[in-house]
Amino acid sequence: MPTRLRPTAPIAPDAVLVGDPGRALLLAQELLEEPKMSNHARGLWGYSGQTPGGRLLTIQATGIGGPSAALVLADLAELGVSRAIRVGTCVGRGESFALGDLLVVTEARAEGGSTAALGVARGEAAMPDPGLTARLTEELGSRALPTAISSFDVHPDEHSPAERAADMQSASLLARAPALDVAVAVVLIVTETTAGAKLGQDEIEEAERVAGKAASRTLSS
């Protein structure tokens, strides 16, 4: 029995992973017909149901940071999840990224923290599943920006490479996935920059819908 999740509805083999419980609710309403709450333990809201195309899908919040995401992924694997796509947010560094960009992660370089315990040392990269990543890129079309990112257990700081976007979960999630035999891909929304610019809430939710729909179509293929 999983130690963090307490499923109250069947868990699908495919899952969309988000950090924020509010994003899980938004995508459940957007992607599922008659979604049922499948977890509320520890505030990690999860929902399961059928997509309009008749495929079973689970949408699960993972909490803040890499350690939480890796632990939730392990529970989901125990419950039968074999493919997952993270729909998250990131900080854009330098001039290569604009607010609202959708970054399909091609590698997540570990910048210390929990990834070391998962076999990925600082400066090394954790890799997403290539097939799932290729299909996700195709589904996003012209919106997709294939990108190598940095990943921290804490908020990105000045030590992050200036040319990279950075988040708080992807490296740990991707480092954990192979041992669990779960294929994982990642799409990130640039919601803020190191210059202090931030995406508005309405724009964030619209980008979440675009990314979530692409993730759902990818997992349905």
Image (cartoon, rainbow, N blue to C red):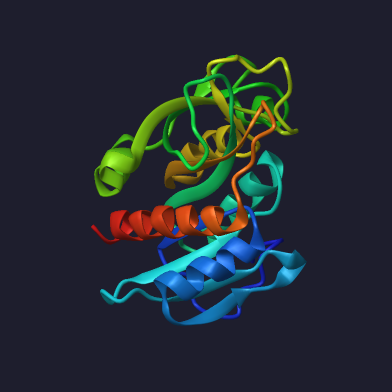
Q: Quadrant of the N terminus?
A: bottom right
Q: In this view, does 32 lie above or below 171?
A: below
Q: Is residue 65 above or below residue 159?
A: below
**How many circles with numbers are drawn on the protein?**
0
Q: Nearer the viewer, residue 10 or 143?
A: 143
Q: In which quarter of the image is the C terminus?
A: bottom left
In the drawing, does residue 20 fall left or right of residue 35?
Answer: right
Residue 86, percent from left and from top = 49, 48
Which residue appears at 27% of the width and 40% of the height?
142
Residue 205: tell me if it is visible.
yes
Q: In this view, does 183 lie above or below 26?
A: above
Residue 121 picture quarter: top right
Residue 77: tell me if it is visible.
no
In the drawing, does residue 216 fall left or right of residue 180?
Answer: left
Which residue appears at 71% of the width and 61% of the height?
3
User: Which residue is farthest bottom?
Assistant: 34
Residue 89 picture quarter: top right
Which residue appears at 70% of the width and 42% of the height?
67
Q: Which of 114 and 47 is in front in this view?
A: 47
Q: Is residue 66 above or below residue 158?
A: below
Which residue appears at 41% of the width and 68% of the height?
57
Residue 88, percent from left and from top = 55, 47
Q: Which of 40 and 6 is in front in this view?
A: 40
In the drawing, does residue 128 fall left or right of residue 217?
Answer: right
Residue 137, percent from left and from top = 30, 41
Q: Nearer the viewer, residue 196 or 136?
A: 196
Residue 103, percent from left and from top = 43, 36
